[in-house]
Amino acid sequence: ELVLATDRIANGEAGVEFRGIRRNDMLGRLARSLKVFQEKMNDRMRLEVDAVRSKEVAEAAQIADRAKSEFLANMSHEIR
């Protein structure tokens, strides 16, 4: 079962359940280590998604700021 779980993690599947985690032998230790690895990989993927979203929001804010500045410059010119 650990081999199948490892394959599923390698294929990018999140939320893989590990049986045998409560075992007190090497297989239990391996299962716990794989669970920690999976949790860290899931956290990393979430951080990467958040970073991409943050970059997109920052770019949209810059575009909006430029549009606002151009609008104010045009309005200022028209008022004069």
Image (cartoon, rainbow, N blue to C red):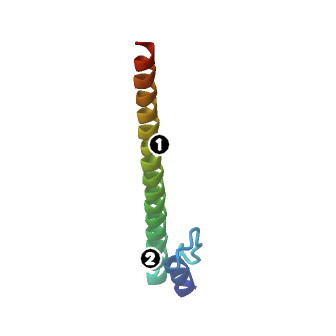
Residue 80 at what x, y percent from top left? 40, 12
Give the label, 1 or 2, closer to the camera.
1
Percent coordinates x, y for residue 4 in the rendering: 57, 85
Question: 10 Å neighbourhood of mark 2: few (<14), some, or many (≥20)?
Answer: some
Mark 1: amino acid: Ala
Is 13 displayed left or right of 80 in the figure? right
Q: Residues within 10 Å of mark 1 (few under 14, many from 20)?
A: few
The residue that appears at 41% across and 35% down in the rendered structure is 66
Placement of 57 over or under 6, stated as above or below: above
Secondary structure, mark 1, is helix
Front-lying residue, 68 or 28: 68
Occupied quadrant, residue 30: bottom left
Residue 70 visible in rendering:
yes
**Residue beneath label 2, please?**
29
Which residue is tagged 1? 60
- The answer to whether residue 67 is above or below residue 75 is below
Q: What is the three-letter code of the residue carrying label 2?
A: Arg
